[in-house]
Amino acid sequence: MSLPAEGMTLILGGAVVATFALVGVELVAGYAGHSIALVSDAVHNLTDVPTLILSWFATRWAKKPPTPQKTYGYHRAGILAAFVNAMLLSLVSVALIYESVMRLRSPVEVKTGLMLWVSVFALLVNGGITLAVTGGRRDLNVRSIWIHNLGDALSNLAIMAGAIAIHYTGLTWVDPVIGLAIGAMVFWSGVGILRESTHILLEGLPRSIDLESVARAMLRIPGVQEVHDVHIWTLGTDLNALSCHICIPDMHMEESAKILAQVHEVLEREFRITHTTIQFERAGLAADANLYMPEPVQRPAS
């Protein structure tokens, strides 16, 4: 189930406050307990704060109506926020990995009791945020928050297990190894979000749509003889756009309007494409446009 934008805005605002509190507790406990895993998690959670603030602003901006200067509105605000969040994630992960390697080379005694209880508190906070934003995962911006906090919750579980292992075995290298694993996980998730947000910002074809399938679906409509110059891109969450040229025979404008309505219906029903710009051309004329597809898609000869 998808959450309304107002509800998600309130959730993200509450998440900022909770994350600030968690960072403070983990930094103090990590310093007092000599745990690089807790300090790494605190730094990681600290990056959540600008991430959450960006996402909060982006959620509010995305609701703003179009203007004469921003004719598409602010649907891309969430995508830009996800892009910046992913950059932060990737940079912080490198710092976490470096610090963990240094601690692995020079291990110190860790206060496992403090490490354990703080990780339980962190799990409650990060797990709560993850569950709260689950309903908005279709939005790439919110999904970046969901992935980020899910990773935080999993790292908290790892820190809890590490604290128990260190307590009973005395193996202090477990702490930096956990920090190293957290850093690698953060890097992996950051790169994934960065790749997806970059694809959208570069007007890439939506991942769930096949270009030729869209063209052939339009060709099934009576009167449509050729489709070319097909472009499909994402404006924002659940908002895909298309522009194309369609060749039809000579007919009255009333008939061409019926074809256009059928095209709109097929695109929305089968591909969830709701914003379209379609140019009709007279069938049989020589194509003089630069084709996006290798060849124009034409109705097979009967």
Image (cartoon, rainbow, N blue to C red):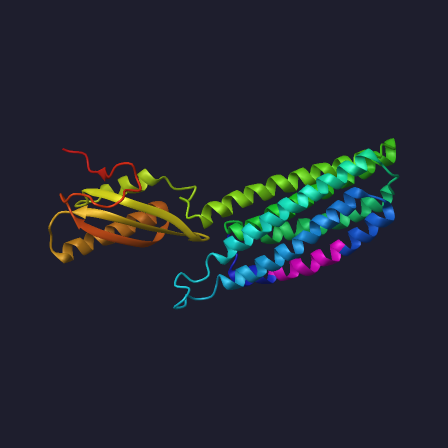
Q: Is 62 on the left-hand or right-hand side of 14?
A: left
Q: Quadrant of residue 298?
A: top left
Q: Foreground: 250 or 97?
A: 97
Q: Tell me, yes or no, whether the highlighted magenta stretch contains residue 230.
A: no
Name which residue lies at 15% across and 33% down: 301
Q: Position of residue 46 (x, y in %)?
A: 70, 53
Q: Is 223 on the left-hand or right-hand side of 22?
A: left
Q: Quadrant of residue 270?
A: top left
Is residue 142 at least partly visible in the picture? no
State the predominant SS element of the stretch in magenta: helix
Q: Tell me, yes or no, whether the highlighted magenta stretch contains residue 16.
A: yes
Q: Foreground: 218 or 229?
A: 229
Q: Position of residue 101 (x, y in %)?
A: 76, 36
Is 302 situated above or below 76? above
Q: Quadrant of residue 166?
A: top right
Q: Position of residue 63 (x, y in %)?
A: 48, 63
- On-image quarter of the C terminus: top left
Is 37 situated above or below 259? above
Q: Foreground: 161 or 77?
A: 77
Name which residue lies at 75% across and 54% down: 23
Is residue 53 at least partly visible in the picture? yes
Q: Position of residue 66 (x, y in %)?
A: 41, 65
The span shown in magenta is 11-23
